[in-house]
């Protein structure tokens, strides 16, 4: 396992930044299988590697998008915020120097639009649009975000709460047999 960690560290030094997410996933999964003694050239592993690669890539991109919202939550002051007037709150939007894959983040009323550059190929030229409101937490106000149908980021890269309404599943749609008792 130490050899695996060392190889992954060397890979990360040679391939810094989010533009290498796919390569890092492939390298990490293959190295992990090899460290476990698996023959990664065996066709049995081809589908596993392909499926695992995509799941890894999606996971990392979701985490990057989640970091955008975490930044807003942690840096926006909601003292004295009026839940009935969320559009009057000035959000602390993430800066492109802290999020290199972000082209811009803008606020219009209670809507935030993120546009992405080409650093993460899966997000290149796409936008994520979310509306926000204020909810009463246990001890203070909290921001609550919801997705918009104006979002062009692929749905498999979005966390559930920022999925566009048209992409959310209802209980009736996920009920296996759709029968009544």
Image (cartoon, rainbow, N blue to C red):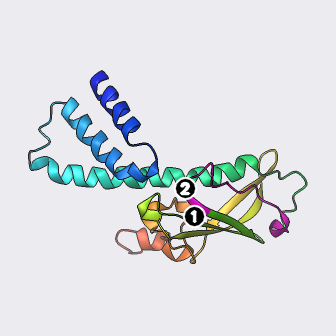
Q: Which residue is at the far top?
A: 2
Q: Which stretch did the figure color magenta? A: 85-103
> Which residue in the structure is indicated by mark 1?
162
* 148 displayed left or right of 35: right
Residue 5 image offset from top left, x and y in percent: 34, 28
Residue 98 image offset from top left, x and y in percent: 62, 48
Q: Is residue 181 visible?
A: no
Residue 119 image offset from top left, x and y in percent: 47, 58
Q: Is residue 124 visible?
A: yes
**In the depicted view, which residue is nearer to us: 71 or 124?**
124
Which mark identifies residue 55?
none
Q: How many marks?
A: 2
First in sequence, mark 2 or 1: give its number.
Answer: 2
Tell me if label 2 and label 1 are in contact, CB under 8 Å.
yes
Vertical side of 5 occupied by 180: above or below: below
- The structure residue drawn at horizontal position 24% and vertical position 54%, both measured from the top left corner, is 50
**Dominant SS in magenta:** loop
**In the depicted view, which residue is nearer to us: 138 or 84?**
84
**In the depicted view, which residue is nearer to us: 46 or 101?**
101
Helix, strand or loop at mark 2: helix
Residue 132 image offset from top left, x and y in percent: 71, 65
Depth-wise, is mark 2 or mark 1 nearer the camera?
2
- The structure residue drawn at horizontal position 47% and vertical position 63%, both measured from the top left corner, is 118
Mark 2 burial class by Cα count in 10 Å: few <14, some 14-19, many 20+: some
Point out the image quarter for the N terminus: top left
* 134 displayed left or right of 168: right
* 130 displayed left or right of 53: right
The answer to whether residue 97 is magenta is yes
> Which residue in the structure is indicated by mark 2?
65
Helix, strand or loop at mark 1: helix
């Amino acid at each position: 396992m130490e050899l695996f960690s060392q190889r992954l560290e060397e890979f990360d030094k040679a391939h810094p930044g989010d533009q290498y997410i796919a390569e890092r996933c492939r390298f990490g999964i293959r190295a992990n299988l090899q460290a476990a003694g698996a023959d990664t050239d065996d066709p049995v592993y081809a589908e596993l590697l392909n499926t695992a690669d995509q799941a890894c890539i999606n996971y990392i991109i979701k985490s990057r998008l989640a970091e955008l919202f975490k930044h807003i939550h942690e840096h926006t002051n909601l003292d004295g915020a009026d839940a009935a007037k969320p559009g009057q709150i000035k959000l602390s939007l993430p800066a492109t120097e802290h999020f290199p894959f972000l082209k811009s983040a803008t606020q219009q009323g209670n809507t935030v639009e993120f546009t992405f550059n080409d650093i993460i190929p899966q997000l290149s030229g796409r936008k994520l649009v979310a509306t926000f409101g204020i909810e009463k937490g246990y001890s203070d106000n909290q921001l609550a975000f919801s997705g918009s149908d104006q979002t062009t980021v692929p749905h498999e890269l979005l966390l559930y709460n920022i999925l566009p309404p048209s992409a959310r599943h209802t209980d009736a749609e996920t009920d296996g047999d759709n029968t009544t008792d």
